[in-house]
Amino acid sequence: MAYEISVVIPVYNVEKYIRQCLDSVVNQSLGIENIEVIIVNDATPDNSMEIVNSYAEKYPSIKVINNKSNMGLGQSRNIGLSNVTSDFVAFMDSDDFISLNAFEDSINKLKKSQADLLIFNWEVFTEDGHIEPPSIHNQNFDVNKVIDDIHDFDEIFLLTSSWNKIYSRKLFKYLNYPTGYYEDNNVTARVLLNSDKIFLSADSTYFYRKNPSSITENISLNNVLDLSKSIKSLFELEDEYSHYFKQIKLLIIKFLNDVLFFLFYYDWSLNEELLIVNEIKKSVGTITEEDLIFFRNLFPSFPIFYMEECLNLHKLSDELFLAKYKYFNTLSKVKSQASIYVDDGNGFREDTKISVDYVPEKNNHLSFDLSRFPKIDNLRFDPVEGDFIKSKINNLEITDANCDNSIHDEFQIFLTLDPIYIINATHNSTLSIDFDLEFLNKDDIAIILAEKNNIISDLNNKSSQKRFRFF
């Protein structure tokens, strides 16, 4: 039978989510009989395959391939692709799902426009259902758009994921995923560069689950080393795609910024730090100020924390690099802890403290379980510990804070290492807090302190003038 589209779904440890994933496929408006579903069992140790097999028994278009051992996401995709029989393929992660019109809408657009590649919208959501705002890698489209020349849409190089796309058979030869983490990046860059026409679709959606237990959410030494190798593989595209290398460098700068962030803000042993620095230095080619300006003009809201490092990394010895950029600076760790203290009638105490570890971002959404407290008189929220910050709570009323400015200002500025909010909240069994947060750097702190000193001096001068006139 000829299928309209194939979808490859590697499966590993997803028994909690695989049913939702498969339901979104078998209920497609295109009709499951027109969709070749290739499930690659990557030697999953849980009960995922019992669920998958129940679907395969019901729907003949679902095919199951069993890896003898765990091969990883990239190799499982390659194995699935080698069994595709249709002219279009999509990849899905097995803990995600898609809108029910995704395949029918996309196939119609690909055929009508004769595009090689379609990229559809996606939403990133967390376990509690919170939808994250668009980011540098998640540029949702308001209208449909056909790209004939990717120079007209330079930002497309940051759309690196394999799962938000549908590929025509022309591109299958470029879909050869390597082992290791961050397997999408080089492959997607080649796909973009070899597509004569790309359709950006606003009418269908991929729903990506941000799973806190996934490999990309838990940064390890292997994550950082693999991302460094991914940077190297992108630099290796220069000779083959020199006409587009300025655009490829956008992705390189983003990933280099990520690696340096991981290096500076995570706790590593000295040997691990030196290993990371060596890998970065082996991976990085030339980054110019022009490249950084190009990046900033396209993504003005994304901060490049490490401009100087991007320009001068290759000039520094390992020890000098760490000394200059880590040990001589006070840096906040990426894994921070937020806490709720519950006043149950006896004040705020350590035994009523509920803490959550999280990775601070510009916007954060945390949930706290308050079900064990039958009585709540007041709530205290500590967004981080051990950092100077500016912050804003978006969904709750603030009644007090130990900030250096007013609680009625847009942001509260904390020049204390123990920032505290007192909040007025409806006391349900779960408390959700949506808040913005930025760490203050040395320049920010210096400016704030200078402004405070000017105010104090001005007040002192006015007070002296009054005393002089009085006497």
Image (cartoon, rainbow, N blue to C red):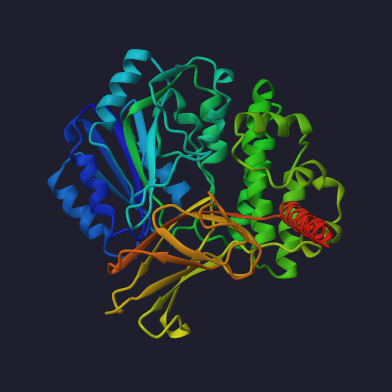
Residue 100: % across, % down? 23, 36
Q: Residue at x 76, y 36 (%)?
A: 287
Q: Is residue 302 above or below residue 328?
A: above
Q: Residue at x 65, y 39 (%)?
A: 252
Residue 329: % across, % down? 77, 61
Residue 208: % across, % down? 38, 46
Q: Residue at x 33, y 50 (%)?
A: 94
- Viewed as shown, does residue 330 lie left or right of 100? right
- Viewed as shown, does residue 390 lie left or right of 162? right
Q: Is residue 375 above or below residue 219?
A: below
Q: Is residue 397 above or below residue 115?
A: below
- Viewed as shown, does residue 77 lie left or right of 373? right
Residue 33, picture quadrant? top left
Q: 132 or 98: which is nearer to us?
A: 132
Answer whether residue 418 is visible to the viewer in this image.
yes
Q: 261 or 232: which is nearer to us?
A: 261
Q: Residue furthest front?
A: 471
Q: 24 or 387: which is nearer to us?
A: 387
Q: Residue at x 54, y 47 (%)?
A: 182
Residue 433, picture quadrant? bottom left
Answer whether residue 82 is visible to the viewer in this image.
no
Q: Is residue 22 above or below residue 2?
A: below
Residue 206: % across, % down? 34, 39
